[in-house]
């Protein structure tokens, strides 16, 4: 009885820790995972579409995608730069080709995602050599749009959907993702139930061999669930049946492992063996 009570205490302690971990996991799959996926997608899309100052290298010329503007920066420090050369090669928006030189400036992004160079204290040379028509203008503030490409970030990926959106969706990917996230939370509890009975060390086997069944059960669980998730995304299986059959099977196994060596179970086995004899 003393051993059973001690084991019961360990199971309760494991369940308390599992409950706390499951709460963290619920917060992760419900809010943090969709938010982090959306943020990562947006950052990567913006960096790819509008490299901006991150693509600027000291002492090198940068050409826009339409090859109409050439920008040279002599010195970059944080978001500011110095010794700037900006050339507009072709006439656009009723503006003739021009060359702008400035002592300093910085880059900013407007609400539409356009990359804008803001220059301070410089000179603008406007005109064409063929027409011999030039205009020289000194300025204190000059702005020019250098690069813009609409962000192609996707907001329909299943990783970016919250649990409510996944629940309402009818596509295969969303259904598989919904039950996969629930399985992650469920696995925290069911694996904690298996910890106590599987952590008992047999002196004849040693610690490594005693840990082998727990490691195999863990690997089999997640490999099987990953396979079922991939099949569910293709529509080959229904995740609410296939994945939860595995979950409930492991829950039954965890319960059996915990009650197998209890006093009532040992008495039941003795009676069964006598009846069979």
Image (tube, rainbow, N blue to C red):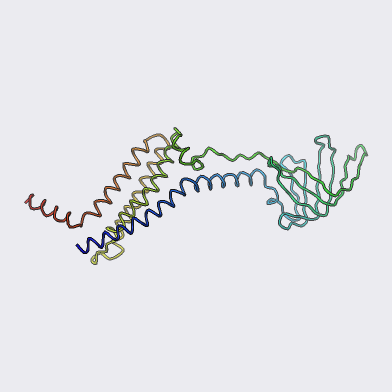
In this view, the residue farthest toward the top is: 170
Q: Which residue is drawn at 37% across and 41% down?
A: 228
Q: Does residue 69 lie above or below 103 as drawn?
A: above
In this figure, what is the number of numbered marks?
0
Give the left or right position of residue 123, taking residue 190 as reference. Answer: right
Q: Position of residue 271 (x, y in %)?
A: 10, 52
Q: Position of residue 39 (x, y in %)?
A: 57, 46
Between 128 and 238, the residue placed more toward the observer is 238
Q: Residue at x 61, y 44 (%)?
A: 45
In this view, the residue farthest toward the left is: 277
Q: In which quarter of the image is residue 167?
A: top left
Give the left or right position of residue 276, taking residue 116 as reference. Answer: left
Q: Quadrant of residue 75?
A: bottom right
Q: Residue at x 55, y 44 (%)?
A: 38
Between 67 and 140, the residue placed more toward the observer is 140
Q: Which residue is drawn at 68% across and 51% down?
A: 54
Q: Which quadrant would the N terminus be assigned to in this image?
A: bottom left
Q: Position of residue 86 (x, y in %)?
A: 80, 47
Between 56 and 15, the residue placed more toward the observer is 15
Q: Position of residue 71 (x, y in %)?
A: 77, 48
Give the left or right position of residue 134, taking residue 203 as reference. Answer: right
In this view, the residue farthest toward the right is: 132
């Amino acid at each position: 009885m003393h051993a059973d009570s001690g084991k019961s205490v360990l199971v309760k302690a494991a369940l308390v820790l599992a409950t706390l971990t499951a709460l963290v996991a619920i917060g992760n799959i419900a809010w943090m995972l969709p938010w982090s996926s959306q943020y990562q997608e947006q950052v990567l899309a913006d960096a790819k579409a509008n490299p901006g100052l991150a693509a600027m290298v000291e002492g090198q010329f940068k050409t826009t995608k339409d090859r109409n503007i050439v920008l040279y920066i002599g010195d970059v420090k944080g978001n500011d730069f110095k010794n700037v050369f900006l050339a507009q090669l072709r006439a656009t928006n009723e503006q003739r080709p021009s060359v702008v030189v400035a002592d300093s400036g910085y880059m900013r992004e407007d609400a539409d995602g356009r990359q804008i160079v803001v220059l301070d204290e410089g000179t603008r040379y406007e005109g064409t050599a063929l027409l011999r028509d030039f205009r020289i203008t000194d300025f204190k503030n000059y702005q020019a749009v250098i690069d813009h490409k609409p962000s192609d970030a996707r907001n329909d990926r299943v990783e970016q959907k919250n649990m409510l959106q996944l629940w309402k969706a009818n596509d295969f990917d969303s259904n598989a993702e919904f039950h996969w996230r629930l399985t992650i939370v469920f696995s925290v509890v069911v694996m904690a139930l298996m910890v106590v009975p599987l952590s008992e060390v047999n002196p004849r086997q040693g610690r490594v061999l005693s840990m082998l069944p727990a490691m195999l059960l863990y690997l089999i669980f997640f490999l099987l669930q990953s396979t079922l998730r991939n099949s569910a995304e293709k529509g080959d299986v229904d995740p609410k049946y296939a994945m939860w059959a595995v979950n409930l099977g492991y829950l039954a196994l965890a319960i059996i492992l915990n009650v197998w060596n209890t006093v009532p179970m040992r008495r039941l086995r003795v009676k069964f063996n006598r009846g069979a004899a």
